[in-house]
Amino acid sequence: MARKTANDDLLAPVTLAVGQEELLLDRAVREVVVAARAADADTDVRELMPEQLQPGTLAELTSPSLFAERKVVVVRNAHDLSADTIKDVTAYLGAPAEEITLVLLHAGGAKGKKLLDAARKAGAREVACPKMTKPADRLAFVRSEFRATGRSATPEACQALVDAIGSDLRELASAVSQLVADVEGTIDEAVVGRYYTGRAEASSFTVADRAVEGRTAEALEALRWSLSTGVAPVMITSALAQGVRAIGKLSSARGGRPADLARELGMPPWKIDRVRQQMRGWTPDGVAAALQAVAEADAGVKGGGDDPGYALEKAVVTVARAARSRGRG
C-alpha cells in the first residue's frame, strides 16, 4: 500500500512516487490522472521514458498552450535521466508551470539521488511505493485492499490468499477484487479455498506446511505441482525456512496464551495455533537439521547446484523426516 506525505493534493505541481513496486507506482500515476481529468476532461497525459526526455523536451511539454489545457507529464524511471536532463528538471521544479502536473517515478536508490533531493526540497507531493518483499507486508497489503472496498475478510482468509497467490501484488489485488465482486458478507478462509484451491495447492507455503507436518508424499506432490506451474524455487526455500523457524521459535518460547506468544514472537495469534499443531513430533535437533537442509537447498537454487528441483526435493524430505523425529530415537 502506497504511503503519502502530508501534501495530499493530487493536483500538486509535482508528485514524486518513490520505490520499486510497479503496482503502487502505476496507482500513483492513475490517481493523479483521474484527479486531473475530473478537473478537466480534456487533460493531455504524456508518459515518457528517460530516453524520450532529452534536454529541452520538458520545456516544450510545459510551455503555455493557446488553449490553456491541463497536462499531466509522467516521467518513468526518473533515476535513469541523463545529467543534462536532470538539470532541466531541477530548474523546472523551482518554477513549475500552471495547469501542469509533473509526476516523477524514482526507484529511490543512490542513482539519480540529486533529482530526488531536488524534488523533495521543492516540496513535491511524495508517494512511497516500496517493494513488498516480506510476507507480512503482503498480508498487510491484502488487508488494506479489503478495507478500501469496505468489505470484511477474516485474518485467516487474508493469509490464505497470500499463501495461494504468492508475491505478485497485481494478482493479489485482482483476487481481492474478484472475491469482493462475487461473494456477499464476510470473506473467510473457506471462500478463499473454493476460489483458489489450485493455486493454494501449488503455492510455496503449501509445500512448506505439508513438509513441516511430516506429510512427505503430499509435500513432494505439492512441490512438483508448484514447480510445474512456475513458482520460483527461491520462494519455496523461503517458505520452508519460515515454517521451520516458526516451529523453532514457538518450541523454545515460554508457554502462554496465543495473544501473549504472538506479541513475543511477532506472529498473529491464529498462526500460533497453527504452528502448535505442526510442531508435534519436532525436536531441537530436528529443527537444526531441517534448517541446515533448507540452507543447502537455498544455495542450490541460487546457482550453487545443477538441479534446483532435486535440491528442493532433498530439503522437503529432510524437513518431513525431522517433523517425525520425536520418539524415533
Image (cartoon, grey):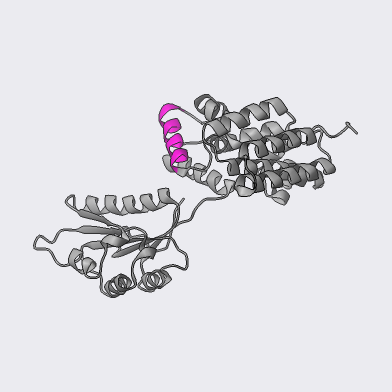
Query: In the picture, residue 323 is in which quadrant?
Result: top right
Left or right: 293 as drawn, with respect to 46: right
Magenta-colored span: 170-184
Residue at coordinates 75% horizontally, 33% vertically from top-left?
Answer: 320
Residue at coordinates 71% horizontally, 40% vertically from top-left?
Answer: 272
Query: In the picture, residue 310 is in which quadrant?
Result: top right
* Main SS class of the magenta portion in the image: helix
Residue at coordinates 12% horizontally, 63% vertically from top-left?
Answer: 65
Magenta segment: does it hold 173? yes
Magenta segment: does it hold 22? no
Left or right: 22 as drawn, with respect to 42: right
- Give the x, y percent position of residue 16: 37, 62
Residue at coordinates 62% horizontally, 42% vertically from top-left?
Answer: 306
For this orientation, the residue located farthest to the right is 329
Left or right: 272 as drawn, with respect to 155: right
Q: Is residue 328 above or below residue 112?
A: above
- Give the x, y percent position of residue 255: 81, 44
Q: Is residue 29 above or below residue 223?
A: below
Quadrant in the picture for the C terminus? top right
Q: Nearer the viewer, residue 214 or 3?
A: 214
